Amino acid sequence: MSNILKLVLLAILLILMAPESAGICKWVDKDGVVHYAETCPEDTRSTEVQIEPPPTQQQIEATRERADRVRSEIQARSAQKEQEKEQKSGEKQPSDKSTDTMNKNCAEAKWNLEILRKQLPVYYDQENRLHYNRSLHSYWYEGQRTYLDDPERAAKILHYAQLEQQTCTESEADIRARIKMYMENRDREICQHLKSKLENMKKFSTGIPSDEMRELEETIATKCR
C-alpha cells in the first residue's frame, strides 16, 4: 500500500474517531510527502487542520427521514400524474366511442332510408340488415328474407328519419363519404361471393349456360368492378 493511500486512510480514520471538532497536525517532509498526525515533530514546520466531527446518530436519522419524505412525495406526485393521465384517457374513450356510434347510426339511417324509398321490394336478412331486390345482395343471398309490406315500410321510414335527425352531426359530404366507403366494402365482399357462386355453377354446367348463369355473369360484369 502506498504512503499516500496510508495517509488518506489515516486521515479518514482520525475524522471518524474524533468525538468533537478537533485539529490534527499536517506537515510535509523533505521528499514532499504530506503527513497527518495528532502531533507534529518539533523540528518540522507544520500547520493545524481543523477536522469537523462526524454526524451524530440523531443527525443521520433526521437526514434519512428527510430523504424518505422526499422520495415518498416524488412517488405520490408520480402516481397522481399517472392517475390523472388515465382519467383523461378514460374520459376521452367514451366520448370517442359515443361519436363513432352516432356516426355509424347516422350512416345506417341514411342508407336504409335510401333503400326504403326505392320503388322495389325490400327485405331484412337473417342478420337484420335491410336490402332491396336486384341489389348485389339479392343475387347471392340464400338465407331467410323478411319482406316489408306498405304499412311496415312507412313505419320504418319514419323510424330511420327520426334516427337521422338524432345522430347526423357530420357534414353531408362526410356522411356520404362514410356511406360510400361502407357500401364499397360490402359490395366487394358480395362480389367475391357472386364470383365464387358462378365458378361453382360452371363446374356443374353441361356446357350450355342457364338463364341463371347468364344473369349472374351480367350482374358481375356490370356491378362488380
Image (tube, helix red, strand yellow):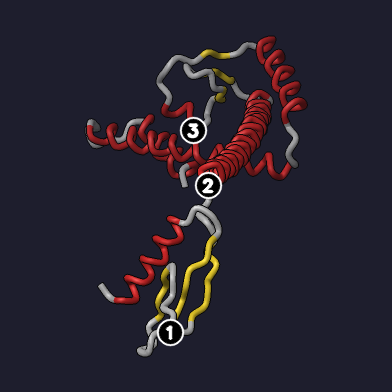
Depth check: 109 or 211 in front? 109
Q: Where residue 151 sits: x, y (%)?
A: 69, 9
Choose mark 3 or mark 2, whichever is in front: 2
Q: Quadrant location of residue 8?
A: bottom left
- Which secondary structure lies at badge 1? loop
At 29% from the left edge and 37% from the top edge, which residue is drawn? 199
Residue 118 visible in this rendered orientation of the protein: no
Q: Where residue 208 sits: x, y (%)?
A: 27, 35
Depth check: 125 or 24 in front? 24
At 53% from the left edge and 47% from the top edge, which residue is drawn? 56
Please give the residue where the numbered disc 1 appears in the rendered image: 43
Q: Does the residue at mark 2 contact the one at mark 1 (Cβ under 8 Å)?
A: no
For the residues labelled 3 and 1, the Cα–Cα distance comes to 115 Å
Q: Does the residue at mark 3 contact the one at mark 1 (Cβ under 8 Å)?
A: no
What crowding class fits label 2: few (fewer than 14 Cα within 10 Å), some (14-19), or many (20 or more)?
few
Relative horizontal placement of residue 189, taking residue 53 as reference (left or right): left
Amino acid at pointer 2: Thr
Amino acid at pointer 1: Asp
Depth check: 135 or 88 in front? 88
For the residues labelled 2 and 1, the Cα–Cα distance comes to 37 Å
Sequence-wise first label, 3 or 2: 2
Q: Where residue 132 sits: x, y (%)?
A: 56, 25
At 33% from the left edge and 72% from the top edge, which residue is drawn? 5
- Which secondary structure lies at badge 3? helix
Image quadrant in which the N terminus is located? bottom left
Please give the residue where the numbered disc 3 appears in the rendered image: 136
Sequence-wise first label, 3 or 1: 1
- Which secondary structure lies at badge 2? loop
Relative horizontal placement of residue 123, taking residue 143 as reference (left or right): right
Please give the residue where the numbered disc 2 appears in the rendered image: 56
